[in-house]
Amino acid sequence: ESQQVQSLAWSTDGIAFTEADDNPVLVAADGVPDFRDPKVLRWGGVDGHWVMVLAAGDEVRLFTSADLHRWTQTDAHRPSPAHRGALETPDLFPLTADDGTEHWVLSLGALQGAPAGGSGTWAEVGTFDGERFRPSAPGRWADHGPDFYAAQSWSDAPDGRRIGTAWLNNWDHASALPAGFEGKPWGADI
């Protein structure tokens, strides 16, 4: 069985990438095989540090780094949804409430156990101090339909909004997508 690792590459044009000489930059110390889907954010502005949140089996782990090459684990969080199996695609981001208070959201993809069956997106609201996430309310499913999975968000939209999207599918029926052009499956050469 292979182990998933985290590696680093960069680009100045979004087309050509250079891989770091010291890859992989992060390997699971406990050898958990599902160690994937990193989301990296900057904490504390230009003089701050990097934070990586990633899925590690049935928990979410947080790491910090000053240089994107050397990472230190600072937290492990096991959410409590009624899910089964490995977690995927964690996201950690701040939202400002109408009253001006800041809240942090940890969302993640659960492979099994969603309300409509199969996979879904679970979210918890809490606090984040640059190293640790602490939920302040019970988590909940982000959607109760069968097709909202692997949600991710982007910041810095021109009007200051945070924009999110999700995979509109479910692992329970991902291989049974409807036919596309001229009866061929979507993604088939046409």
Image: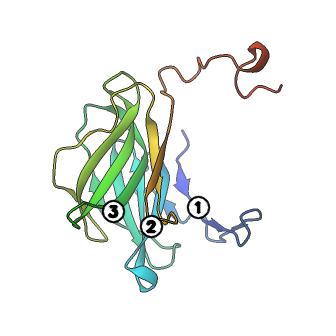
* Residue sticking out furthest to the right: 190
| Measured Cα–Cα span from mark 2 to mark 3 | 11 Å
Question: What amino acid is at disc 3?
Answer: Pro
Mark 3 vs 1, N-terminal side: 1
Q: Mark 2 or mark 1: name the one nearer the start of the chain.
A: 1
Q: Quick check: 141 above or below 101?
A: above
Q: Which mark is residue 7?
A: 1
Dot 1 surroundings within 10 Å: few (below 14), some, or many (20 or more)?
some
Judge whether 186 appears above or below 107 on screen: above
Instruction: Estimate how packed mark 3 is, as few (under 14), some (14 to 19) or many (20 or more) residues with alpha carbons within 10 Å.
Output: some
Please provide percent x and percent y for residue 127: 22, 62
Residue 99, given in percent of the width and then of the height, sits at: 20, 64
Residue 39, x across and y down, in percent: 47, 58
Q: Nearer the viewer, mark 3 or mark 1?
A: 3
Q: Is residue 34 visible?
A: no
Badge 2 is on which residue?
41
| Residue 182 found in image quarter | top right
Which residue is found at the position 72% from the left and 29% from the top? 187
Amino acid at the residue labelled 2: Leu
Quadrant of the snapshot with the N terminus: top right
Q: Point out the image quarter for the C terminus.
A: top right
